[in-house]
């Protein structure tokens, strides 16, 4: 042993001791970088409430796990004051989660890295078989092909479906627009296909709007909200989700926030739930196309047809009238939700985002006029900002065990 080895060993021992003291901070530290709240080691130190040495050891361990990169030289933005700090960024070549989404007009698979970044996507399929096992087998095959092509390590897989998903069973209770049987064990089927494909990590499944809300809260328009309400149209129907203190509120068995079955037009269309005039059938793409006097075509999805009609032909009286009718119905539903939930922010996705863009003042006025708390100050109503937010949210399910315990999940 030469004379230089002893100081190095002592230094390594000191670093290891610091890491041991801060090991419980690994998960919170990764989540801070993952959500963009800790761009530098100095911010990480302050947010975690630990010493600079401990924060440095934590960052070094996350880098050793291949999750983040720490700039070798500290730097400061132009015009900033204070001591320069090492910048933290997510590893561009790090692990990924396999994300899958199934909706009425097809399915898609993608690989999603930390930070909600889409690494690779497979071409979407526009045919959804009535047998969920066939569909989920196909989407997993597409994901497995992406993993093979990219050579990325996979931490797990998440699935978004347009149905309430009951917990703890993981069954899709009402996949009406997919023609799947009620109670289909989608999580079990998905997990079986994942493991049969040799893909590592756990498999999860949840409602697509719940996952869109989770993704937007961490990476999009909902960032920073305490009580976030998300309402969105998919390709058919209307869904809602609530994020409280950074976590999805899913109720006692995963079935909370079935906002599509709020009645907004008592004399309206019959709904598959047995009621009449629900948001699900009064404020979705098919309802809009019908109100505008358009026959849905088979060429593209109903959602794209409705969005294109508003964006390209809003000046036509029939289109404008239909848009205003749906805005009023949506506003009535949102007002009721504001009265019950008292959110500090509302975000809208799918066709509802397009309705907001078309006439934001009308929608905000309806919500304010019809809600107690809206009258007293107004609730910010914003458009969702992430492309493929349900896919990103599905990946968040798979990333959560890593965020909870990076060392345990990856080693």
Image (tube, helix red, strand yellow):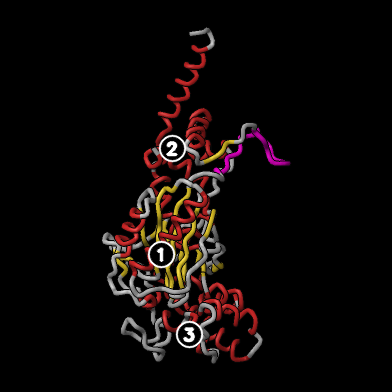
Foreground mark, 3 or 2, reads: 3
Q: Is residue 205 rendered magenta in the image?
A: no
Local packing at callout 3 (Cα closer than 10 Å; few below 14, some 14-19, many 20+) is many
| Picture residue at 50% right of the left edge, 39% below the top | 66
Left or right of residue 76: residue 54: left
Residue located 34% across and 53% down the image: 195
> For mark 3, what is the residue?
287
Badge 2 marks a residue whose secondary structure is: helix
Pick whichever of labels 1 and 2 is earlier in the sequence. 2
Residue 138, labelled with which disc? 1
Disc 1 from disc 2: Cα separation: 39 Å
Secondary structure type for disc 1: helix
Residue placed most toward the observer, 298 or 74: 298
The tag on residue 180 is none
Which of the two residues, 144 or 274, is positioned nearer the viewer here? 144
Q: Which mark is residue 25?
A: 2
| Prevailing SS of the magenta stretch | loop
Say if the magenta span includes residue 90.
Answer: yes
Mark toward the start of the polypeptide (3 vs 2): 2
Q: Nearer the viewer, mark 1 or mark 3?
A: 1
Between 190 and 390, the one nearer to me in the picture: 190
* Residue 59, image x, y percentages: 51, 35
Task: Decide: is 139 above or below 81.
Answer: below
Q: Which residues are magenta?
A: 74-91
Q: In the displayed structure, would residue 32 be above or below residue 57?
A: below
**Figure quadrant of residue 43:** top right
Q: Position of residue 369 (x, y in %)?
A: 51, 78
């Amino acid at each position: 042993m030469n004379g230089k080895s002893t100081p190095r060993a002592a230094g390594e021992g000191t670093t290891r001791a610091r890491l041991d003291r801060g090991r419980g901070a690994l998960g919170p530290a990764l989540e801070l970088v993952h959500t963009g709240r800790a761009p530098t080691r100095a911010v990480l130190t302050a947010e975690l409430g630990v010493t600079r040495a401990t924060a440095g050891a934590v960052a070094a361990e996350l880098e050793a796990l291949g999750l983040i990169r720490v700039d070798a030289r500290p730097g400061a933005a132009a015009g900033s004051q204070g001591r320069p700090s090492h910048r933290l960024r997510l590893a561009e070549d790090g692990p990924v989660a396999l994300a899958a989404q199934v909706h009425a007009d097809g399915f898609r698979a993608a690989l999603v890295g930390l930070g909600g970044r889409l690494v690779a996507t497979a071409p979407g399929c526009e045919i959804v078989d009535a047998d969920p096992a066939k569909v989920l087998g196909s989407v997993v095959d597409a994901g497995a092909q992406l993993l093979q092509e990219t050579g990325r390590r996979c931490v797990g897989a998440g699935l978004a479906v347009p149905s309430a998903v009951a917990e703890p069973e993981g069954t899709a209770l009402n996949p009406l627009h997919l023609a799947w049987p009620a109670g289909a064990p989608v999580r079990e089927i998905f997990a079986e296909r994942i493991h049969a494909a040799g893909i590592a990590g756990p498999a999860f499944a949840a409602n697509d709007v719940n996952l869109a809300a989770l993704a937007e809260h961490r990476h999009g328009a909902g960032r920073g909200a305490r009580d976030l309400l998300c309402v969105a149209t998919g390709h058919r129907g209307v869904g809602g989700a609530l994020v409280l203190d950074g976590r999805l509120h899913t109720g006692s068995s995963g079935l909370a926030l079935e906002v599509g079955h709020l009645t907004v037009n008592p004399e309206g269309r019959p709904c598959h739930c047995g009621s009449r005039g629900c948001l699900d059938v009064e404020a979705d793409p098919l309802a809009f196309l019908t109100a505008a006097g358009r026959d849905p075509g088979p060429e593209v999805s109903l959602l794209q047809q409705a969005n294109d009609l508003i964006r390209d032909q809003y000046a036509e009286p029939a289109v404008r009238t239909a848009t205003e009718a749906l805005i009023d119905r949506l506003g009535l539903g949102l007002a009721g939700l504001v009265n019950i939930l008292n959110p500090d922010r509302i975000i809208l996705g799918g066709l509802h985002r397009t309705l907001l863009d078309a006439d934001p003042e009308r929608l905000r006025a309806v919500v304010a006029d019809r809600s107690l708390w809206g009258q007293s100050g107004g609730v910010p109503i914003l458009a969702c900002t992430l492309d493929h937010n349900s896919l990103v949210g599905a990946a968040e399910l798979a990333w959560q065990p890593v965020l909870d315990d990076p060392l345990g999940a990856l080693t």
